[in-house]
C-alpha cells in the first residue's frame, strides 16, 4: 500500500499521547472493535482483574510528539509508522465524509498511546487492544498491538493489517453516528469488518494512495480478520470452541464480511442484522 508522495496529511486527526494517559483504577467500558474477547482473554492470561475493564473517567491527553511537523505528506506516511496511521485515518475519514450526506459526517480522532491511557470510557492499558470509545468519539491504538497480532494471534501482519484494524474501529464510529443498535455484538462487529472492506475498495478514490490495493495487501487484512475470530482465539486460549460465547464472530465470518464490503464497495451491502451471517 503506497501513499501518493504529494498527498497532504492532516495530522490533527491523530493525537500522540505516548505513555502520559495516567492509568487510574476504573477501567474501560468495552464497546467494540477487537476489544471484547481480546480484553477478557488478555486479563486472564496476564493476571489482570477483569473487573478493572469496566467503568472509569474521561481522558486528559497531552501530546508527546509533534505529528504536525513529522507527518505532512504521503511520502512521510511511507516512511513512518505513526505517519502511516495518519494517512490511513485521513483516507478512511475522507471516504466516510463523502459517503454521508453532505456535511453530516463528524470526524473522530485516533489516539496513539503506550502502556495506558485515560478515555471517555474509562482507563485502559495495552492489553485491551485497539478500541473505539463512543463517549468521546475517539479510536485508541497502542501500536505494539500489531506485533501481538502476529506473535500471539498468528496473523501475517504488515501495513494493510494495520489499516484493516483501523478501518474496523472507524466502522464502529460510523455505527455510532447512525445510531446502529448494539444489542447483538457479533452482528455489530461483523458489520464493522464489512465497513472496513468498503473503505478498502474505495480508498484510492480518496486521493491518498497511488493505486488500488494488491492481492497481497488484501491477504494481510484477511489474515488479521481470521486471526481474531472468536473460534481461533478460544481454541488457542482454552482448547475448545464455544459458539454461544462468541462476541465478534468466527474467523470465517470475519473474513466473509470484510470481503463482502471489499467486493461491493457499498455500505448498503453491510446489513448484517437482517440476513444470515
Image (cartoon, rainbow, N blue to C red):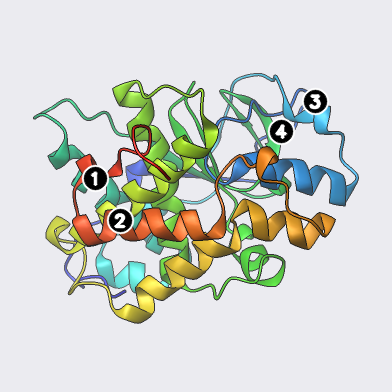
Q: Does residue 27 appear to the left or right of 169 in the view shown?
A: right
Cα distance, mark 3 to mark 1?
41 Å
Look at the numbered disc 2 and give the secondary structure of its residue: helix
> Which disc, if any, is residue 25?
3
Along the line of sight, the residue nearer the viewer: 34 or 82? 34
Q: Earlier in the sequence, mark 4 or mark 2?
A: 4
Mark 1 crowdedness (10 Å alpha carbons): few <14, some 14-19, many ≥20: some
Along the line of sight, the residue nearer the viewer: 94 or 217? 217
Q: Furthest residue to the right?
A: 47
Cα distance, mark 3 to mark 2?
40 Å
* Disc 4 to disc 2: CB gap under 8 Å: no
- Horizontal and vertical percent for residue 103? 12, 27
Disc 4 versus disc 2: nearer the observer: 2
- Horizontal and vertical percent for residue 42? 77, 48
Residue on which disc 4 sits: 22
> Which disc, if any, is residue 269?
1
Q: Earlier in the sequence, mark 3 or mark 1?
A: 3
Please determine whether, in this image, residue 208 is positioned above or below residue 53: below
* Disc 3 to disc 2: CB gap under 8 Å: no
Cα distance, mark 4 to mark 3?
10 Å
Q: Residue at x 43, y 51 (%)?
A: 166
Q: Can see residue 243? A: yes
Quarter of the image where the N terminus is located = bottom left
Q: Does residue 100 appear to the left or right of 39 in the view shown?
A: left
Cα distance, mark 4 to mark 1?
41 Å
Corner quadrant of residue 151: bottom right
> Which disc, if any, is residue 260?
2
Look at the numbered disc 1 and give the secondary structure of its residue: helix
Mark 4 crowdedness (10 Å alpha carbons): few <14, some 14-19, many ≥20: some
Q: Earlier in the sequence, mark 4 or mark 1?
A: 4
Amino acid at each position: 500500500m503506497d501513499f501518493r508522495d504529494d498527498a497532504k496529511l492532516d495530522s490533527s486527526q491523530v493525537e500522540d499521547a505516548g505513555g502520559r494517559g495516567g492509568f487510574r483504577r476504573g477501567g474501560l467500558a468495552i464497546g467494540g472493535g477487537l476489544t471484547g474477547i481480546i480484553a477478557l482473554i488478555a486479563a486472564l492470561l496476564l493476571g489482570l482483574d477483569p473487573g478493572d475493564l469496566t467503568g472509569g473517567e474521561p481522558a486528559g491527553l497531552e501530546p508527546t510528539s509533534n505529528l504536525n511537523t513529522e507527518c505532512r505528506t504521503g511520502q512521510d506516511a511511507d516512511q513512518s509508522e505513526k505517519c502511516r496511521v495518519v494517512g490511513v485515518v485521513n483516507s478512511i475519514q475522507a471516504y466516510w465524509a463523502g459517503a454521508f450526506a453532505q456535511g453530516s459526517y463528524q470526524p473522530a480522532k485516533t489516539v496513539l498511546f503506550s502502556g495506558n491511557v485515560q478515555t471517555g470510557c474509562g482507563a485502559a492499558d495495552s492489553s485491551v487492544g485497539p478500541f473505539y470509545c463512543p463517549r468521546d468519539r475517539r479510536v485508541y491504538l497502542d501500536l505494539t498491538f500489531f506485533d501481538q497480532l502476529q506473535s500471539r494471534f498468528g496473523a501475517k501482519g504488515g501495513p494493510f493489517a494495520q489499516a484493516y484494524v483501523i478501518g474496523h474501529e472507524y466502522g464502529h464510529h460510523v455505527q455510532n453516528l447512525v445510531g446502529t443498535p448494539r444489542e447483538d455484538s457479533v452482528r455489530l462487529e461483523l458489520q464493522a469488518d464489512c465497513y472496513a472492506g468498503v473503505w478498502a475498495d474505495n480508498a484510492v478514490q480518496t486521493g491518498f494512495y497511488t493505486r488500488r490495493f494488491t492481492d497481497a495487501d488484501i491477504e494481510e487484512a484477511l489474515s488479521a480478520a481470521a486471526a481474531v475470530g472468536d473460534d481461533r482465539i478460544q481454541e488457542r486460549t482454552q482448547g475448545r470452541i464455544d459458539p454461544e460465547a462468541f462476541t465478534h464472530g468466527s474467523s470465517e465470518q470475519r473474513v466473509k464480511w470484510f470481503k463482502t464490503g471489499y467486493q461491493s464497495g457499498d455500505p448498503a451491502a453491510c446489513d448484517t442484522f437482517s440476513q444470515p451471517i
